[in-house]
Image (cartoon, rainbow, N blue to C red):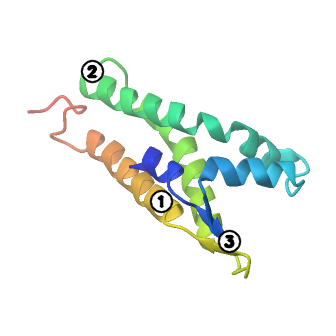
Amino acid sequence: MTVTGTFLPWLRSGTRNRSSYAIFDLVERLGFAPGGVVSWSLRLWPLVPLLLVGVTIGGWCVAAHRVSWPSLVAVTVPTILWVGGTAIAILTAPDVALFRIGSGPTVTLFGVLLLAGGVVALRRPGSAASGAS
């Protein structure tokens, strides 16, 4: 759900919908992210699907007792903060007459919350990761 949300419309300008990948490329090209963390975040945004696939595979590995739950958390927390924080930033941005916020950030944020819940569920007693039946 999170990956799907990144490809849905995040902003609508005029008659054109823009996914997260299109708007972040546009923001960088127009110079709104001159440097620092924001600039790196925008440059690395195309890696989001890869990170989410990695978290999913990590969840399967935890359930199969191949890796520890803290290892999964070490990968998941930064991913959730980055992707969820970006979606929240777009959703809480001031209204601008030229742009309308699309469904992408909301779907992405909901997906991130489900992802966090899934990782927590892997740790609770009785889960596949806990080793109990």
In the figure, residue 84 lies in which quadrant? bottom right
Identify which amino acid the numbered label 1 is placed on: Leu
Using the image, tell me which numbered label, if any, was put on residue 68. Answer: none
* Residue denoted by label 2: 65
The residue drawn where x is 47% and y is 53% is 5
Disc number lying in front (2 or 1): 1
Task: Point out residue 20 in the picture as x, y percentages from the top left corner.
Answer: 61, 52
| SS under mark 3 | loop
**Tag 2 and tag 3, C-beta contact below 8 Å:** no
| SS under mark 2 | loop
In the figure, residue 113 lies in which quadrant? bottom left
* First reached walking from the N terminus: tag 2 or tag 3: 3
Q: Is residue 63 above or below residue 82?
A: above
* Residue denoted by label 1: 109
Disc number lying in front (2 or 3): 3
Task: Point out residue 74 in the picture as x, y percentages from the top left corner.
Answer: 51, 35
Using the image, tell me which numbered label, if any, was put on residue 14. Answer: 3
Q: Is residue 10 above or below residue 53?
A: below
Identify which amino acid the numbered label 3 is placed on: Gly
- Between the C-alphas of marks 2 and 1, the distance is 28 Å
